[in-house]
Image (cartoon, grey):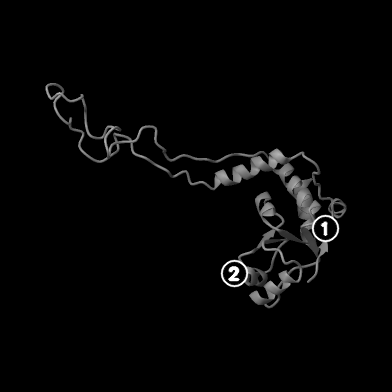
Amino acid sequence: MSGKLLSISDAKAANITVVEGDKGAQAVHDLITAYRANRRTGSANSKTRSEVSGTGKKMYRQKGTGNARHGDKGAPIFVGGGVVFGPKPRSYNKKVTKSVRKLALRKVLGEVIASERVLAVDSFEIADGKTKSFVSAIKGMTDAKKVLVIAGSFDEKTYLAGRNVQNVLLMTAAEVNVEQILHANAIVIVNDALETLAKRTA
């Protein structure tokens, strides 16, 4: 398989809207931040003085000992006591509007195409379903360390052949996101994916 370098003019001819210049940088930042925040489990949890194990009995009598006044050993000043203002389970989810998502996609597509990291191919399929054939096909197009292949769809044998290749990611044009595009050193776009990308950037 061999690919043709995709240019900005080729992308525009395929009705893919791209952003050139500085516009859209903030949209990309906001979207990547949202991706990372939404992956957080938010499961950090600390116990307050009412939740730690142990008795709630007063440590010693209020007066006459010469010591400070204390209640139970669960107070935050004692080892094994509760935590003041500690983390509790929470959601870190961030919402990003459709317009920002679209602008970010336009921006990163424009950047990777302008940096000559995108190859266009007529088709990408591994008929025998073998990993060796998959690796050979990728090497025949690029020697980049991290490769993203975008197509309208992939057959089962192609997925089977590529599942153990860690540096190559197969994504459909409908599902690929900004983070995956930025992460790749080289991007291979199958021609049947151009129409879907054009719709997503329109």
| Residue bearing the label numbered 2 | 164
Which quadrant of the view contains residue 103? top right
Q: Is residue 31 visible?
A: yes
Looking at the image, residue 70 lies above or below residue 146 = above
Looking at the image, residue 171 lies above or below residue 179 = below
Give coordinates of residue 2: x percent, y percent. 80, 69
* Residue at point 73%, 72% (across, down): 137
Q: Residues within 10 Å of mark 1 (few under 14, many from 20)?
A: many
Which quadrant of the view contains residue 165? bottom right
Give coordinates of residue 51: x percent, y percent. 30, 37
Q: Residue 128 versus residue 113: which sits nearer the camera?
A: 113
Q: Amino acid at mark 2?
A: Asn
Quarter of the rendering occupied by the N terminus: bottom right
* Residue at point 36%, 32% (across, down): 84
* Residue at point 73%, 59% (across, down): 187
Q: Amino acid at mark 1?
A: Leu
Q: Which mark is residue 6?
A: 1
Calculate the distance from the C-alpha at mark 2 to the C-alpha at mark 1: 28 Å
Mark 2 vs 1, N-terminal side: 1
Q: Residue 195 versus residue 94: which sits nearer the camera?
A: 94
- Give the number of marks: 2
Q: Label 1: state its secondary structure.
A: loop
Which quadrant of the view contains residue 146? bottom right
Q: Is residue 199 visible?
A: no
Residue lying farthest to the front in this orientation = 66
Give coordinates of residue 140: x percent, y percent. 76, 71
Residue lying farthest to the left in this orientation = 64
Q: Label 2: state its secondary structure.
A: loop
